[in-house]
Image (spheres, rainbow, N blue to C red):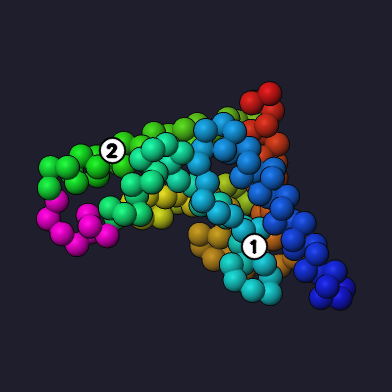
Amino acid sequence: MNSRHGNRQKHILESSIKINCELALNIVGIGTLFSCSGHLDTLPAFPYITIVPQREVAGLVPRYICIMETQPLSQGALAVKHAIAKAMSELGQHLLSLLNGFYEERQTPLPCRLVIQASGVGSYTLLNQGAIVALLPDQATLGAYQDEFLAFGAYLKSIWE
């Protein structure tokens, strides 16, 4: 495969995960920041989607994270911290309920299953379980990981319609 054809395929897959899964998450009320389909020849090797709150509190997260970690908090900052924690808890519970519904009748090998991983105070990462333990993917494994994201996107669209 020539590199131009390979780059085109990567772009199509990136677009497919963005359109099918990331957009479907947005439609069902889950905010996203960015995503990647994973790459065998560069990092990141695994597909993932960064999940963030889809509310007004989401705009507060980047500005207040540094303050909350380095300085004593005022009453106003404590209120913001509480609002962020509440929004993240609600977001995590919503995403977890969607994943529970998706896997209710779906038999999937554990390394391919999608899981939620905390990524600091203001975001989660949705990724395959195999990525957490750094199972190095070959082409077939990467394809299975990507297919799981696409199937989850299709599931989200089916419950939204």
In the displayed image of the protein, which residue is found farthest to the right? 1
Q: Residues within 10 Å of mark 2 (few under 14, many from 20)?
A: some
Rendered location of residue 111, percent (x, y): 60, 54
Residue at position x 57%, y 31% from top?
28
Quadrant of the image containing the N terminus: bottom right
Q: Which mark is residue 83?
A: 2
Mark 2 lies on a secondary structure that is helix
Q: Is residue 3 above or below residue 34?
A: below
Residue at position x 66%, y 54% from top?
145
Magenta residues, start to end: 66-73
Residue at position x 81%, y 69% from top?
6
The amino acid pointed to by label 1 is: Gly
- In this orientation, which residue lies closer to the viewer: 89 or 59? 59
List the residue tagged with mark 1.
38
Mark 1 lies on a secondary structure that is loop
Q: Is residue 151 above or below residue 61?
A: above
> Disc 2 and disc 1: Cα gap in Å?
33 Å
Residue at position x 64%, y 26% from top?
160
Q: Is residue 28 visible?
A: yes
Give the dominant element type of the magenta stretch: helix, strand or loop.
helix
- In this orientation, which residue lies closer to the viewer: 117 or 124? 124
The amino acid pointed to by label 2 is: Ala
